[in-house]
Image (tube, rainbow, N blue to C red):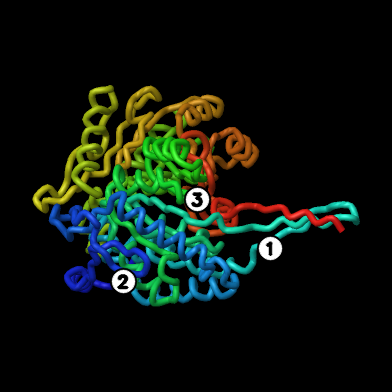
Amino acid sequence: MTDKTLGYWQAKAKDARIHTQAYIDGKRTDAASGETFETINPATGEVLAKVASCDVADVDKAVAAARRAFKSGIWADLHPTERGKVMIRWAELMEKHADELAVLETLDMGKPISDATSIDIPASINSIRWYGEAANKVLDEIAPTDPGALAMITREPIGVVAAVVPWNFPLLMACWKLGPALATGNSVVLKPAEQSPLTALRIADLAEEAGIPAGVFNVVTGLGHTAGKALGLHMDVDGLAFTGSTQVGKYFMEYSGQSNLKRIALECGGKSPHIIMDDCPDLDAAAQAAAGAIFFNQGEVCTAGSRLLVDRKIKDKFMAKVLEAAKSWVPGDPLNPATNLGAIVDDSQYRRVLGYIETAGKDGGKLVAGGAAARTETGGYFVQPTIFDGVTPEMTIAREEIFGPVLAVIEFDGEEEAIEIANNTIYGLAAAVWSKDISRAHRMARALQAGTIWVNCWDPTGDLSIPFGGYKQSGFGRDKSLHALDKYTNLKTTWVQL
């Protein structure tokens, strides 16, 4: 938690530097149409700024700038060590302005400042630094051939990359893509979510100051169905990396097929099962983890442990502990360092979450905690941490991604039923198992259909060396780790007959 006071962050918020123009080819620019959209402070419902609403013409301009920069070789042909040095300088500048970036993130998205300062901003900086350090450590290969030939396998940047990122971790999700894409020599057009564009616009200044050449990094602000779609359909975008909903991920797959078959990488939704077996080694720790897994970041997390599966043998004892743990999650002013549960990102998502709560009650779920709006006097979008017991797998809140602080508790009898319920979903992003039987834990981890499986913990680390991504309709391709470089490079074989 930050050691700075509410007064400090309120002063920071008042003095925050808010950019409203897109950043294209090293210059700030209004949308060609002159149109803007409002970005809202979720804690108050008040307008923070009116931001350039870019469309096809602006996307064309940004992609053309990225292509010119790429063809010039000013970045793509720079020695990897030198690219890495520029990226590390960029990370250092982000670190210098960490408090400013944190307050912009909190104002724009409603997350607690304590999370922004301890998780989001440090992890974003680390991503840029980590890939800067990795830039000269990815080696090409020589294939085994007979003595009469030499077969070289080399990696080349794919060219112009579009990165379309969500609002729940605005800067972090951007940096997960900017790091590997830039480290491998690509030029990038970043489209932040319209709900949370402010940190993306601010780091463009820092990128320029660090020495990233004009056109190599561009930020196009706009709506998903205009600017996002334009990037998806663009004939001169070579690859597009997206984090967001499964529905929108499918749109980008369609756009690729309708245009130039650009490479698509998707990190989409989740409905992650958090499984508590009857031999759970620490019920208290598991209960704290169960609450954090769904209430952290207001439940606006793709890996949120939104389905809590509990063995019937320990159900009553365990749920008493979960309900107690939930009491520590209290909606509050996001700028207050003591707050651990902030505001829902906007009015639309706020109403969506409340709608799911209403549906859960109608479907027969038993409300045992929360279930209503909070802090309504502020004008902001706050929802109480909510728990429904007695949920069955076919209920809406057990099947659909809510993206809010709403937990569905499902009973099971034994390992086989737990796996069946856990895998009965279109998603496959993450899962967890609590058991002191290591053989059972391995067995279940192998059976669970998800990209990440935690055992006796929930999301314990942001270690960048670990790949992140999903199975099934949670998408494909990996963020983080050296595996992320695969999305942004082409493999070329050069066969030399000696």
Q: Position of residue 454 (x, y in %)?
A: 53, 45
Identified by mark 2, the residue type is: Asp
Residue under numbered circle 1: 139
Distance in Å between CA atoms under marks 3 and 1: 23 Å
Q: At 32% across and 64% down in the image, what residue appears?
A: 23
Let me know if residue 272 appears in the view. no
Callout 3 crowding tier (Cα within 10 Å): few <14, some 14–19, many ≥20: many
Residue under numbered circle 2: 99
Secondary-structure class at tag 3? loop
Identified by mark 3, the residue type is: Asp
Q: Relative to residue 45, is residue 72 depicted above or below?
A: below
Q: Relative to residue 326, is residue 77 depicted above or below?
A: below
Q: Are marks 1 and 2 in contact (CB under 8 Å)?
A: no
Quadrant in the rendering for residue 99: bottom left
* Label whose residue precedes the other's in the sequence (3 or 1): 1
Callout 2 crowding tier (Cα within 10 Å): few <14, some 14–19, many ≥20: some
Residue under numbered circle 3: 238
Quarter containing the C terminus: bottom right
Q: Are marks 2 and 3 in contact (CB under 8 Å)?
A: no
Identified by mark 1, the residue type is: Leu
Distance in Å between CA atoms under marks 2 and 3: 35 Å
* Label whose residue precedes the other's in the sequence (2 or 3): 2
Q: Position of residue 157 (x, y in %)?
A: 57, 58
In the rendered picture of this protein, how many numbered marks are placed on residues?
Answer: 3
Q: Nearer the viewer, residue 181 or 274?
A: 181
Secondary-structure class at tag 2? helix
Q: Nearer the viewer, residue 127 or 413?
A: 127
Q: Position of residue 141 (x, y in %)?
A: 74, 58
Q: Is residue 154 left or right of residue 6?
A: right
Q: Relative to residue 82, is residue 434 depicted above or below?
A: above
Q: Are marks 3 and 1 in contact (CB under 8 Å)?
A: no
